[in-house]
Image (cartoon, helix red, strand yellow):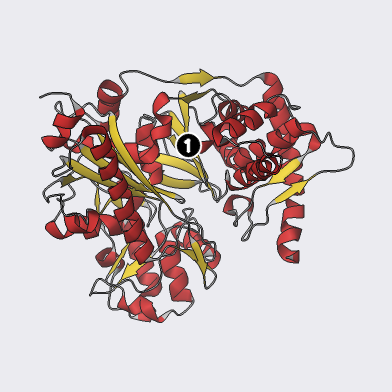
Amino acid sequence: MTSDPKSIIQQGKAVLGIEFGSTRIKAVLIDPQNKPIAQGSHQWENQLVNGLWTYSVEAIWYGLQDCYADLRANVRKLYDVEIENLAAIGVSAMMHGYMPFNSDGKILVPFRTWRNTNTAEAAAELSELFVYNIPLRWSIAHLYQAILNGEEHVGDIDFLTTLAGFIHWQLSGEKVLGVGDASGMIPVDPATRDYSAEMVEKFDKLVAPKAYPWKLAGILPRVLVAGENAGFLTAEGAGRLDVSGHLKPGAAMCPPEGDAGTGMVATNAVLRRTGNVSAGTSSFSMIVLEKELSKPYEMIDMVTTPDGSLVAMVHCNNCTSDLNAWVGLFKEYQELLGVPVDMGELFGKLYNAALEGDADCGGLLSYNYYSGEPVTGLVEGRPLFVRSATDKFSLANFMRANLYASVAVLKIGNDILFNDEKVEVDRITGHGGLFKTPGVGQRVLAAALNSPISVMETAGEGGAWGIALLGSYLVNNPGKLSLAGWLNDYVFLGNAGTEIAPTAEDVEGFNRYIESYKRGLAIERAAVEAK
């Protein structure tokens, strides 16, 4: 078989990965050697409707179709061919949240995303019942909160899934979910790689007095692991994806996954003692454990890799949004002066300026809380910049404080793993927008976690490439290797990326910053109460 991209597309050997991120839907087409050969994207934003963050079903479909149309245009421009057949398709999306459907396949309430923090009561009760940390964004917390609120739609639920599970269902007709995403609906038992039977039973007993016509296991997606077939693209699904009508049905579909799972795949971090940090609109770290933690922690979510290994996850609702807003302010100033703006250059200069600042940011503090932050106990957020008259207020310290803020909550959670639980890792890989400017985000994260951080050339490909790889693993795994073995031997070929180790000065400076940050959380709480 030829390795020419045009021929690969014409032969139907290309694999498509689609990921629904918080601000962008991205499609990546890869060849059988797992190299990207085309891509498309669509920008979108969530809406706050009746106090809850959501994306409408119409926005979901328009975004998917526009993203695919952009991919088609890219393929035509590069290779002058149409996509008619695909070897495999994978769908990924921001994790968890709440999408309940009735028996007619109609959504019962608007999609409730990971960003909502209205489930505190339910999450607390379930965490106590299960003796297991249940985060606010998990599907089971949303479901139980709806029950506590007495919402009428609950009795009509026939199927409950995530955004990735919804799209996959509509394209393939299969109500399934990859084990990584499934582990954020209700906890998964690592031994069975399926929903915890004990917790499912406890939940059914808890809600039994309500006499709903369903049992929990009956409304959840079937759990699959990486490498298992999750159905095929149907004729209806092909029409919904490609409104031009060129795409034919029949492509194999891998289990749909959450963005955490695809991030692990895209950074070759599914093996035990490896980890990765995704840093964009939100951030999260994923550390693949050798054994279970000694006890549940409210700050740490227990999920799995796409092949079912136990993972300790620290998820932070806020990362680069406030940082980007400040850079946008500098863009306006530059435009005011009549100077042409290159955003890549602007980000690069401001990020690199931060490296010239004091290791502890000169006393400056930033709280990037666009929304609530469960790790630090904030139900709502207020972006704040805090300084005293005696702090060293310079551009370098200002930018450094905002960069530190983007990973501060991540540090608070990971300190539990590394300091209290003595978890050991051999490699942590960073990916996402924070690492686009070479070396800067890497150095900041290395200081925060007091650990070497690697970034690969492929880090910018992100989750869409990660889910495309899972699609390729389904159809291009000749030796039937484990996912970790296949990634290492066929995709990354031993490439561990470029590593930056923390300096003692940076680590000490970040530790001083984080102590001030923790004390200053009282200011953030007061701001929430005041406005």
Amino acid residing under circle 1 = Gly
Please give the count of numbered marks on the rendered protein.
Answer: 1
Residue furthest out toward the front: 338
Residue displayed at 25% across by 23% down:
490
Taking depth in this image into account, of 255 and 455 the one nearest to the observer is 455
- Would residue 344 appear left or right of 189 to someone viewing this image? right
Residue displayed at 32% across by 60% down:
61
Residue 393 at x, y percent in the picture: 82, 36
The image quadrant of residue 65 is bottom left
Residue 421 in view, yes or no? no
- Would residue 518 appear left or right of 288 to someone viewing this image? right
Taking depth in this image into account, of 399 and 336 the one nearest to the observer is 336
- Would residue 472 appear left or right of 439 to someone viewing this image? left
| Crowd tier of the residue under label 1, counting other residues whose Cα lies within 10 Å: few below 14, some 14–19, many 20 or above | many
Quarter of the rendering occupied by the C terminus:
bottom right
Whether residue 359 is situated above or below residue 305 in the rendered picture: above
- Would residue 153 appear left or right of 239 to someone viewing this image? right
Residue furthest out toward the right: 390
Quarter of the rendering occupied by the N terminus:
top left
Whether residue 204 is situated above or below residue 337 in the rendered picture: below
Residue displayed at 73% across by 30% down:
396
Taking depth in this image into account, of 233 and 147 the one nearest to the observer is 233
Residue 234 at x, y percent in the picture: 14, 56
Whether residue 400 is situated above or below residue 518 in the rendered picture: above
Residue 518 in view, yes or no? yes
Residue displayed at 66% across by 32% down:
350
Residue 29 at x, y percent in the picture: 26, 37
Residue behind mark 1: 432
Residue 198 at x, y percent in the picture: 34, 58
Secondary structure found at label 1:
loop
